[in-house]
Structures are given as C-alpha cells and as structure tokens.
Amino acid sequence: MAITSPAMDRVTEYGVESVPDCLTFCAPGVAITVNLLIERILLRVSFNPGNSEEPEIKAEELYDCLITAESGPIDRFLFVSPHILFNREALQDSFQTQVQTIPFNTDRNSDWHLPMETEITDDLVTVRLHASDFEKEEVFHSFSGTVIQPRLLIPDQLSSDESLDVLSGLGRSVFECRFDRPIEIGKSIWIRLAIKPLQLIPPASLESPNDNSGVPFIPNCLIF
C-alpha cells in the first residue's frame, strides 16, 4: 500500500516551488550515489465508533536504502521526514520509539514487497528486482551491499526550542544516522529504516465515506 499526496508549495525569489512530501537525505559535504531506494508505506485506517467523521490513520513506513560513498568517507547521513517524530519532553526517547533500523531477513512475510527472496551472506545483502526493460523473459537486476546499523538521533543543533518550533510548524523532523566507523569511498551500504509516526498529519482534509465502505475519501490523494 502506498500513498501519493499533493506537494507542499514554497515561495522563493524564483517563484513557487513544489516540496515533495517524502523522505529525503544527504551526506553533508560528501557526494553519494543512491543505487536503490525502496519505499513501502502501509496505511491503517480506523473509525471511532463514537465519532465516525474523524477517522484515525496510522502509517508504517519501511525504507531500504543502498548508498555508495563517492567523493569521501561518510560518517553520517541527515534525513528529513514529512512527519513530526518527536516529543519535546522526552526528545530522543520519543524519537527512537518511532524510528529504528531493523535487519534484513529471508522471511517472505516481512519482505513481501520484494519480488524475490533476499540473499544474505554474513553481512552482505543482495536484493533482486525486476528489470523495467524486459520483454519476453524475466530479467532481474541485483543490488548488493553491506548492512550497517547506525545510531539514530536528533542532532543537538536542532534540539533547541526555537528549532523544534520551526520543525513542528513545518510538520517535519530532521534526524541523523551516525556510523561508528566512516564508510570508505566506493563502499556500498544498506540501511533499512522503519518509521511508525505516532502522529500522522494528512495532506488534505479527511471526509467520511458515503458508501459505508469504511475507507475515507482524501481529496487529491490516492491510496493503493
């Protein structure tokens, strides 16, 4: 299940630009290649029996990122999420209950979004995906890298009340993946992020369904 939503708009000196509602990341000061990024989003919708006009939506997001260091060693990544993933009163603890790194495995029940079973040899993981250009016979591309378990945290520079006010107003979170040892140039690594926001802000107002299906209608938003 995935969701596409309207982009946020921002005004710049060049006019209005669209800001996508998705996870973005970078390695500060270092060029990287994103070899593969797989995004899986589950939306769970429920209605309060006492107030059917206010459905509750919960999201379970999984991101498989295969990244190669290009211009220098990488000691951290910065991620920007379109969710508020923190509580000021327990900043790091509340963040870490909503964002975690989890291991790859060969269990098809947990990796059902992948077309073939994940190959794992020691700490090397290989994912095989359908090629988009095959015609008569199935063709697969292989993507391999070492699995890394980074430390996840909200950077100290963004932990002030002023910074958190800005992030809350934007409906965003910025967090950091730190590595115990830098990722060397040319090395490809996997990071598997699981994000379960406690609060999900829909991209548009929710309306109660008219067909008694139990599924809400979200204007300008597609749910698959």
Image: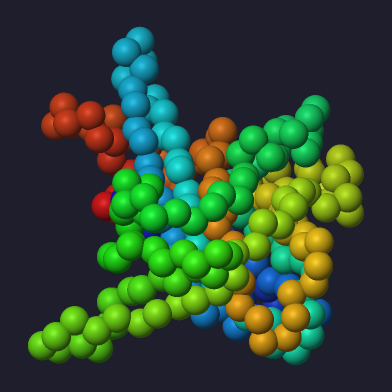
Q: Position of residue 5 (x, y in %)?
A: 41, 56
The reply to whether residue 214 is in sight is yes
User: Within the image, what quadrant is residue 162 found in?
Assistant: top right
Observer-nearest residue: 221 or 82?
Answer: 82
The reply to whether residue 24 is in sight is no
The structure residue drawn at horizontal position 50% and vertical position 76%, both measured from the top left corner, is: 144
The structure residue drawn at horizontal position 81% and vertical position 67%, both measured from the top left corner, is: 181
- Specify the farthest residue to the left: 136
Q: Position of residue 143 (x, y in %)?
A: 45, 77
Tell me if residue 126 comes above or below residue 102 in the rendering.
below
Tell me if residue 161 comes above or below residue 135 in the rendering.
above
Observer-nearest residue: 224 or 111?
Answer: 111
- Specify the farthest residue to the front: 122
Q: Position of residue 69 (x, y in %)?
A: 69, 82
In the displayed structure image, the side of residue 153 where residue 208 appears, left or right: left
Tell me if residue 80 comes above or below residue 28 in the rendering.
above
In the displayed structure image, the side of residue 210 where residue 224 appears, left or right: right
Observer-nearest residue: 137 or 205?
Answer: 137
The structure residue drawn at horizontal position 28% and vertical position 65%, both measured from the top left corner, is: 115
User: Within the image, what quadrant is residue 58 found in?
Assistant: top left
In the displayed structure image, the side of residue 139 where residue 87 appears, left or right: right
Q: Position of residue 61 (x, y in %)?
A: 47, 49
The structure residue drawn at horizontal position 44% and vertical position 60%, both measured from the top left corner, is: 39
